[in-house]
Image: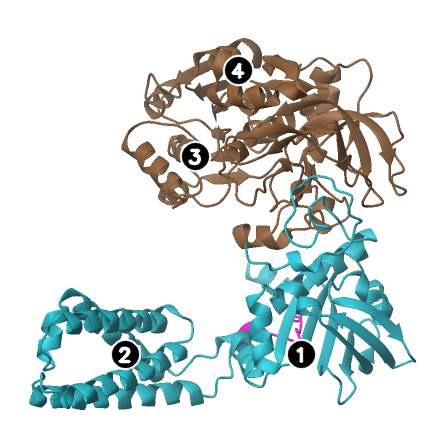
Amino acid sequence: MEASIQEAPQEAPKQYERRYTEGAQPRRWDDDRLARGLGWFSLGLGLTQLAAPRGVARLIGLQGDDEDRKAMIAIGMRELASGIGILAQRRPGPGVWARVSGDVMDLALLGRAINSNRADRNRVAMATAAVAGVTLIDLLAGQRLRHRPNGGGRLAEAERAHERGVVLVRRAITVNRTSQEVYEFWRNFENLPQFMAHLEAVRILDDRRSHWIATGPAGSRAEWDAEIVEDRPNERIVWRAVPDSEVPNEGSVRFVPAPGGRGTEIHVELRYSPPGGRFAAKIAKLFGEEPGQQVAGDLRRFKQVMELGEVVHSDASIHRGMHPARPSNELPRIAPSMEGAVR
Amino acid sequence: MRAICWEGKKTVRVEQVPDPKILNSRDAIVRVTSAAICGSDLHLYNGYIPTMERGDILGHEFMGEVVEVGRSVGNLAVGDRVVVPFAIACGQCGACQRDLFSCCENSNPNAWMAEKLFGHSPAGAFGYSHLTGGFAGGQAEYVRVPFADVGPLKVPEELTDEQVLFLGDILPTGYMGADLCNIQKGDVIAVWGAGPVGQFAVASARLLGAERVIAIDRFAYRLQMAVDKAGASDVINYEEESVLEALQELTAGRGPDACIDAVGMEAHGHGPVYAYDRTKQALRLETDRPIALREAIMACKNGGTVSVMGVYGGFVDKFPMGAVMNRSLTIRSGQCHVQRYMRPLLERVRKGEIDPSFVITHRMRLDDAPRGYEMFLNKEDNCEKVVLTM
């Protein structure tokens, strides 16, 4: 039996350009524990404040009248929210910073109380000292979570890009065609508007340069020249807008044979700085223009064009926005706003 | 043209809408001659399937005559009489090439909606909400049929509409329910639900060689049909006895070798568990009431198969995973891959091995469809299947 095991063909493991072990880099355990501790502290404090608002008010030296009670309940709700924010989210950082801003608010309220005649000054002073201590711990935890190397995972990378006002989108799809077929179609950039909803037209200028016209949220328009930076037939194309473009952007697409004759994997990576920077990106998101979703839709249509020769339409999908599933006099077209629209 | 449109919970209307036109090169336009109301249309009618829009044309069981073909449709001509599968499939993606037509990767333009609910998207379908594409349905005078070179099946003139209409959905669906059970000599099969799909599951289990087939329902007329027409050997009326006890007795403690759920997300039942599911569904805390499915799992023999053909829309509660895991059960399921089954089933119909028209209890005009929905929902006048003609 052993012999047969040894005789089994030893195939070298396939080398993937991107392995998912990247995402496995752990956060530092100590930092996480500190953040989680603060999360539980928030929950405990919040629940106590909600259950016994007057009691807590008196404990910190206030009178515990109706006004104090209302303030305690509001603060308790806030504590619950930051506790849940820390414990329930993949990244505790924002929740910890919410705690810091809560601390500042509490210190301000206590500062006002210590100067009023209604309060027990000794108790208020003690409470202030306690809150100041907690504030220090919160600040420390927030700093540590912010400054950690943060190398791991797709989220971290997208977040870092976002900090610089760059939208980073990565999407992939498998197409039932050879890498040569998909490469050749993509390499002719004039084909891209066939499946990219936001692209109005691309004109080839020469071997390396092309002119792109795109539409953005709320009817905005942008044009730029792009140049090919890298071109490896059947494997990879990298392009970027020429310097000083209206919408700085770059993109790459890799074509990888899918295992076991499953066609070709198309891996797309886009980076762009929307005019208006981070703010504009947030606004676009608010209006349902989620860039990842957009690219996912583009790739789905790319698959349709490659496998079927055209984009598939339904009675509803040819309309911008929602439309009942019934015939209309509209002409078929790609209606981008359906993608990622919030329903 | 006239079409049956969904106008909100428990409201369908006959409306005048524009005629369909070719949108893609592989489309055909079919003039509908017969259409049916499906049990799964009742899930839409009752408002349990998300992403419906007021004005959506319903209907995914239909047949008719080709009146126009797109430039890439080579196999159909104007005048051909065809039955159309309910699920739309391109025939060229990885899923279609593995015969998983109802999982077609290209036919749902709203795949992103389905991904939110299901993780990945299934195929597009006629008249079945926007998360399966927003395609107008076939309870109408005309319908646009995408990928007309893959789906529609030409049917011979000597067979009537009523004999072949169900090849587009419920006959293959019932048949697939039995096919997934991998029936062996001596097998006892239990079928939950004696609606049309349940009837065809019973008949198919017989065709595939089951020793005994047990039909389970709460309506005596449906159980009677299962015995008289579909060939059930035994029936259980769950209003009158405990299904699990009856199955124990009928199988001498083994449990059925395979169980087919032909009920789906709006199952009925008894007692506190039923009340629990009804309440949670009404409050939108669960989308589906899996009463029949739970029972099928509990009843199934150790190592047996539970074949789920009833439609589920989202999430179920109190799923007996312990029974599945500890007793080596296999759950098999799927929207029917109609394109896989309709040709061999047409052969069986032609040879007279099965005449699916036995489920039809009511025939009416398209204009009377709103009444048909109501009757079918309330099981008025022993309603089993409503067929609409133009």
Q: How crowded is mark 2: few (under 14 residues within 10 Å), some or many (20 or more)?
A: many
Q: Could you say which disc has been placed on residue B282 in the image?
A: none
- Residue A67, horizontal then vertical, whole percent: 17, 72
- Rounded to the nearest angstrom, the CA distance separating label 1 from label 3 is 47 Å
Residue extent of the magenta highlight: A10-21
**Which chain did the image draw in brown?**
B
Secondary structure at badge 2 equals helix
Q: Mark 3 points at which residue?
A: B293
Looking at the picture, which amino acid does disc 2 mark? Leu
> Is residue A29 placed above or below B356 in the rendered structure?
below
Q: Residues within 10 Å of mark 4 (few under 14, many from 20)?
A: some
Instruction: Tell me how many marks there are.
Output: 4
Q: Which of marks 4 and 3 is in front?
A: 4
Q: Mark 1 points at which residue?
A: A271
**Residue A85 colored magenta?**
no
Q: In front: A217, or A24?
A: A217
- Residue B383, horizontal then vertical, whole percent: 53, 15
Q: Residue at left 49%, top 40%? A: B331
Q: Is residue A186 left or right of residue B256?
A: right
Asked if badges 2 and 3 are on one and the same chain, I answer no
Q: Mark 4 points at which residue?
A: B383
> Is residue B181 placed above or below A101 in the rendered structure?
above
**Which chain did the image draw in cyan?**
A
Q: Mark 2 points at which residue?
A: A38
Query: Tags 2 and 3 in contact by the CB under 8 Å rule?
Result: no
Q: Can residue B151 be seen in this view?
A: no
Asked if badges 1 and 4 are on one and the same chain, I answer no
